[in-house]
Image: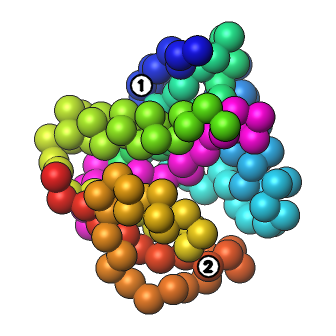
Amino acid sequence: MTLKWKIKRFHELSTLELYDLLQLRSEVFVVEQNCVYQDIDGKDSKALHLIGEFNSKIVAYARLFDAGDYFEEASIGRVVVGTNYRDKKWGHELMQKAIAAIKDYYKTTSITISAQLYLQKFYESHGFEVTSEVYLEDDIPHIQMKITT
């Protein structure tokens, strides 16, 4: 079982792809995490969209930003794998692809993320280090993490 990976700019996304990735984000970040927040935040148009498909369904996703578009450094956000696919460990593949895409597209090796605290060890396994105290973002504990590869 492998994922088909795509990277697209906002204007390259089909209507169906946009709908499906927003549905996945809503399913996990709003419904599963029981968190009412503004997912459509005006930043999608600046991002590269890393999409992992399985059987023509978007099951893994992250959005990637150039330095200055979200944080001072390049960044990765909205990292998500669908609930029914987490046992496949595709989150690790997603992060590897995201880090590589930042290097390829933005020509930088410094990346900052705002990570949910419970995922600290997951991000540390990809080389990220904690650079802040715990803070609340949409009432969920987060930490800022950075990597320079």
For image coordinates 77% across by 34% down, the residue present is 84
Of the numbered discs 2 and 1, the one sitting upstream in the chain is 1
- Residue 53 % position (x, y): 59, 19
Element under label 2? strand
Crowding near the residue tagged with mark 1, few <14, some 14–19, many ≥20 C-alpha atoms within 10 Å: some
- Residue 46 % position (x, y): 42, 44
Q: Is residue 146 visible?
A: yes
Quadrant holding the N terminus:
top right
Element under label 1? strand
Note whether 61 is above or below 7 in the view shown.
below
Note whether 87 is above or below 3 in the view shown.
below
For image coordinates 79% across by 66% down, the residue present is 35
Q: Which mark is residue 141?
A: 2
For image coordinates 42% across by 25% down, the residue present is 7
Lateral position of residue 77 relative to residue 73, left or right:
right
For image coordinates 48% across by 57% down, the residue present is 122
In-front residue for pair 143/14? 143
- Residue 140 % position (x, y): 67, 75
Residue type beneath disc 1: Ile
Residue 8 appears in which quarter of the rendering? top left
Is residue 42 inside the magenta stretch? no
Residue 141 appears in which quarter of the rendering? bottom right
Lateral position of residue 24 relative to residue 62, left or right:
right
In-front residue for pair 83/89? 89
- Residue 65 % position (x, y): 36, 48
Q: Which residues are magenta?
A: 66-86
- How far apart marks 2 and 1 lie (CA) works out to 29 Å
Q: Is residue 14 visible?
A: no
Residue type beneath disc 2: Pro
Q: Which mark is residue 7?
A: 1
**Disc 2 vs disc 1: which is toward the camera?**
2
